[in-house]
């Protein structure tokens, strides 16, 4: 429910996102905590201590392991990549001119995307690639797991200024991470580049009105 409220808030406030199609996917849900679901974090920590484990890696009875959450994220990301490749193959403009994208323009104004936001085909040098901008809204624990998948499995390129603790931290509410993903049909894995992780400077000066 919170992610649905967040994405609809974005659609209402952003002049770039009004025509975006929203699709819900159960693979983006937060980690399932079993018997600890909906209970205070202090109780989860107490359960972990009683089991002789650290809280982040502890799995309550009926909950998901970290590996299960990671595999769920991997499955979603691979599905998303294949979906974009399918759209690219069906887009008649793909071999002529990359389609304009208002969200991409908005991102380029705020983040140092450089020339990476308009990918070129590796198999056909000089040919423009198909550009798709995708906004994914999920939860902190799940996104932390997905970030770990990008870091270890995809060997994503991260800004040198990011520390190890920043790469392993949970995203704050409404935190923004931006990635540039380049792939072609037949690639074993996509090339991924991180622009920023868990950015929250857009909250500067914002006060809680509720």
Image (cartoon, rainbow, N blue to C red):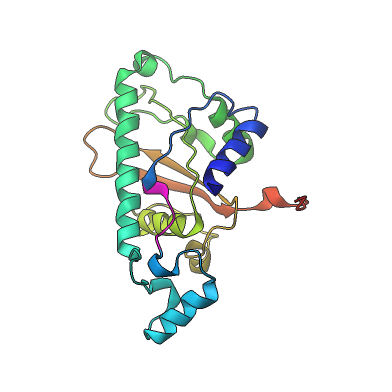
Q: In this view, does 210 lie to the left or right of 71?
A: right
Q: Position of residue 132 (x, y in %)?
A: 43, 30
Image mark count: 0
Residue 30 is covered by the magenta coloring: yes
Could you say which is closer to the camera, residue 93 or residue 14? 14
When the figure is inspected, residue 15 is found, relative to residue 178, above or below; the finding is: above
Could you say which is closer to the camera, residue 82 or residue 185? 82
Could you say which is closer to the camera, residue 92 or residue 97? 92
Q: Where is residue 33 in the image (x, y as percent from the top left)?
A: 41, 65
The structure residue drawn at horizontal position 39% and vertical position 41%, both measured from the top left corner, is 25
Would residue 112 be visible to someone looking at this image? no
Picture quadrant of residue 120: top left
The structure residue drawn at horizontal position 48% and vertical position 49%, both measured from the top left corner, is 138
The structure residue drawn at horizontal position 32% and vertical position 52%, both measured from the top left corner, is 72
Most common secondary structure along the magenta stretch: loop
Q: Where is residue 162 in the image (x, y as percent from the top left)?
A: 53, 61
Residue 178 is covered by the magenta coloring: no
The structure residue drawn at horizontal position 49% and vertical position 53%, both measured from the top left corner, is 139
Would residue 194 be visible to someone looking at this image? yes
When the figure is inspected, residue 20 is found, relative to residue 41, above or below; the finding is: above
Q: Is residue 84 left or right of residue 99?
A: left
Q: In this view, does 199 lie to the left or right of 167?
A: right
When the figure is inspected, residue 119 is found, relative to residue 62, above or below; the finding is: above
Q: Where is residue 1 in the image (x, y as percent from the top left)?
A: 53, 46
**Start-end of magenta stretch:** 27-32
């Amino acid at each position: 429910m919170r992610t649905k409220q967040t994405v609809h808030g974005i659609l209402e406030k952003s002049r770039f996102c009004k025509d975006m199609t929203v699709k819900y996917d159960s693979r983006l849900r937060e980690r399932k905590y079993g018997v600890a679901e909906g209970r205070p974090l202090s109780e989860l920590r107490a359960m972990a201590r009683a089991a002789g484990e650290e809280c982040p890696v502890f799995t309550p009875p009926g909950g998901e392991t970290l590996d299960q959450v990671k595999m769920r994220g991997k499955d979603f990301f691979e599905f998303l990549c294949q979906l974009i490749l399918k759209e690219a193959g069906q887009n008649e403009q793909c071999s002529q001119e990359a389609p304009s994208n208002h969200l991409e323009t908005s991102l380029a104004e705020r983040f140092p995307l450089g020339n990476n936001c308009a990918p070129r085909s590796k198999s056909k040098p000089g040919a423009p690639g198909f550009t798709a901008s995708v906004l994914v809204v999920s939860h902190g624990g799940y996104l932390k797991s997905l970030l770990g998948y990008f870091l270890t499995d995809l060997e994503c390129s991260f800004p040198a200024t990011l520390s190890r603790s920043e790469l392993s931290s949970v995203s704050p509410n409404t935190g923004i991470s931006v990635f540039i993903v380049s792939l072609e049909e037949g690639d074993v894995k996509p090339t991924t580049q991180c622009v920023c992780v868990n950015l929250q400077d857009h909250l500067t000066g914002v006060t809680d009105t509720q």
